[in-house]
Amino acid sequence: MHLLIYMLFFATLSWLVLTVQNQRRLLAVTLAGVMVATLVGAPQPAQAQLGLLQAIQAVLNVINGVIQTALTSINSVRSAMNNLQQLVVWPQQLINQARAQVTQMIGQYRNLMSNIFRMKLNSATLPNPQALEAVMRDHQVGNFPALTAMFTNNYGAIPVSTAANPGDRVMSDMDDALALDNLKTLKAGDQATDIELQSADAIENSSGQAAPGSAPFLTATAITSAIHAQALTQKLLAAELRQEAARIAHRNTLRKENATNTTAVRGVLVNLLQHQ
Amino acid sequence: MKRLTALLKATATWFSGHKLRASILAVVLLFTAPWPARAQIISPCCAMLVAGLSSIQSALTKVVGGGLNQILGVDKAMQQFQQAVVWPQNLINQARGLVGVLQGNFNQIQNLMKIPVNSATLPVSQRLEQVLLSRNPNQIVQTSSAYTALYGPVPAPTAASPQVLNMVDMTDAASLAAMKRAIEIDALADLELQAANQLNQSIQTAAPGSAPIIEAQADAWLIRANAYTQSATADLMRLRAIDLANASADVKMGATNTTSLRQALANLMQHQ
């Protein structure tokens, strides 16, 4: 575009120079042409080199100023977080110390407590009580008929219907039944206790190798084990409640019979005195 | 060719006739014609631009790249620490595996608690025993009738003194309540075992971040279970308190009866 304008201008100037009549006009046309050519051919204003330098310096200032400051700050924060995690929240030394403590306490207590817990408590001296005691304390649930047989050997069977009044027979049967129920429940409870101890050992073993991130699993399952233990305790308490209730009910029945018998005796005595 | 030669001759003739005007046009053309731009390679402006860009590149490499590399180094260290020390996948899997193993133990305990222990042999006692061991709260309403069938009702008002009647009724009430509580506690313990199994199964599929939530719920269940245990213990204590009170009442009534008997005998001797 610029070149086209220049060609048009030069053609016009040439025509004027060639067609002008005298020297003075030639000079005037020449000067006017030069002036116009200067205007037409003048270079476009270029940006100053000083502006480019300033722009580059500005970019460098941003990099060395804002960006460097921001990156340094981020690095400081991340380093602080790293230190916090490694030195305060999860210090490797204390993690190892906790694991070592678990191992040490296993060595210190487990066998000792297990030996105490497994000490033989059997104390009977005669054959029948010894047999009953052995089967009562064997932690097995597959020999309930043997338990019943040993119990009968020691405490006798329910009297036949002609040997006792019906009330005494059913009360004896109920007493024996609840005693046997509880002995069976205790055998099951003993076995469940053994399993609970196995669970506790397994959880403790794992806690000796656990990481902070795996410990919540062990804690949660330990709590569910504790719920099981509570349920087992409740089962035993329920059995104890049944047994105690039956014992008191039995004595209360005797009280009822005593009251009835006393009233009957009093009636007999009054009648006797009246006849005298 | 001839025409070109003639044109050149005419032009040369014209230039020789108009030397001044031709010279003016030549000079104007020489000084005002647009010339091609000089190559940039030799421009000082370009050299400055190159130097500036080089400085920017250097600054980006050292300041930005260096800073980012430091942050990356810290982040890598944090990642490695968390993966190796805090959340090691193998130990997490190992813990999950243990939870699965313990589930087997829990199932064994649950099965042990379901083993039938019924032992009564006579129909009346069998009926009461069946109700007591039912673990079914809906059967609590049958406890009173089964109990009365076995242990008898409270004597009629004419059959005993009011004090004895009160003792008998209170003792039956405490005994019955304890039996009912035993059925309740059995049923609650079954539900606790069921809930504990559900919780344990949830733990097996939990993440390290979600396990504490299940743990919190399990803690709540444990508190609840403790409360039920305390409630059963309270009933046991009530039962024993009533038993002790009965023993005390027996002593008191024995003393009163002895005094009355002594008085009656004295009166009898006086009448004779």
Image (spheres, coloured by chain):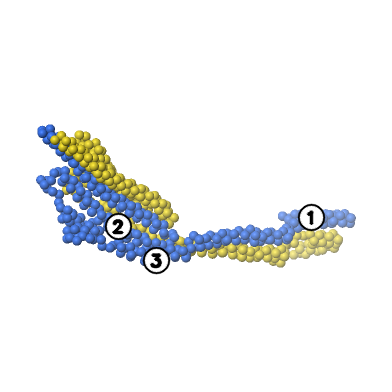
Chain colours: A blue, B yellow
Residue nearer the viewer, B36 or A130: A130
Name the disc covering residue B189, or none.
none
Sooner in the amino-acid sequence: mark 3 or mark 1: 1
Q: Where is residue B163 shown, x and y percent of the image?
A: 25, 38
Q: Amino acid at mark 2?
A: Thr
**Residue at horizontal 19%, vertical 56%?**
A147
Q: Where is residue A141 shown, x and y percent of the image?
A: 23, 56
- Mark 3 or mark 1: which is in front? 3
Rounded to the nearest angstrom, the CA distance separating label 1 from label 2 is: 109 Å
Name the disc covering residue A104, or none.
3
Q: Chain of mark 3?
A: A
Q: Are marks 3 and 1 in contact (CB under 8 Å)?
A: no
The residue singled out by tag 2 in the image is A193
Sooner in the amino-acid sequence: mark 3 or mark 2: 3
Q: Amino acid at mark 3?
A: Gln
Q: Chain of mark 2?
A: A
**Residue at horizontal 52%, vertical 60%?**
A84
Residue A101 seen by the camera: yes
**Residue at horizontal 39%, vertical 57%?**
A219
Q: Chain of mark 1?
A: A
Find the residue positioned furthest to the top: A274
Local crowd size for mark 2, using a 10 Å CA cut-off: few (<14), some (14–19), many (≥20): some
Numbered disc 3: secondary structure: helix
Rounded to the nearest angstrom, the CA distance separating label 3 from label 1 is: 99 Å
Answer yes or no: are tags 1 and 2 on the same subunit: yes
The residue singled out by tag 1 in the image is A39
